[in-house]
Image: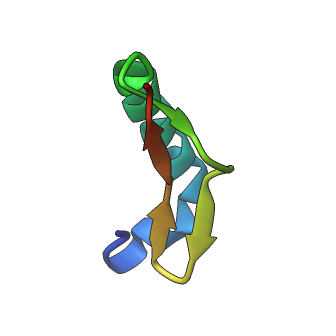
Amino acid sequence: MFRGREIVHKELGNVVMEKFFDKVKDQGDKEGPISSAGREMNLILTPKK
């Protein structure tokens, strides 16, 4: 979730989300792309079997 003027830097939010996914990619897979709605960014992960 972006606060205050952080909303201007959505590309930094994408970088943070990609770094997070790189750390947990052995635990799950991306279900879709990173989505942005207003002040929030979402990444849906599914567990690996």
Q: Where does residue 47 sit, x and y in percent of width and height?
A: 41, 36
Q: Is residue 11 left or right of residue 44?
A: right
Residue at the spot 68% in from the left edge and 50% down from the top edge: 33
User: Front-most of 34 and 39?
Assistant: 34
User: In the displayed structure, would residue 16 be above or below residue 27?
Assistant: below
- Quarter of the view holding residue 38: bottom right
Q: Quadrant of the C terminus?
A: top left
User: Front-most of 30 and 38?
Assistant: 30
Q: Where does residue 44 sit, x and y in percent of width and height?
A: 50, 53
Query: Which residue is outermost to the top?
Result: 26
Query: Which residue is outermost to the front?
Result: 49
User: Front-most of 42 and 9?
Assistant: 42
User: In the displayed structure, would residue 13 be above or below residue 6?
Assistant: above
Q: Is residue 33 left or right of residue 45?
A: right
Q: Is residue 35 left or right of residue 29?
A: right
Look at the image and name its color scheme: rainbow
Residue at the spot 36% in from the left edge and 24% down from the top edge: 27
Q: Where does residue 11 sit, x and y in percent of width and height?
A: 60, 49
Residue at the spot 53% in from the left edge and 32% down from the top edge: 29
Q: Is residue 8 left or right of residue 48?
A: right
User: In the displayed structure, would residue 40 be above or below residue 22?
Assistant: below
User: Front-most of 49 and 10?
Assistant: 49
The count of marks equals 0
Q: Where does residue 1 sit, x and y in percent of width and height?
A: 35, 69
Query: Which residue is outermost to the bottom?
Result: 38
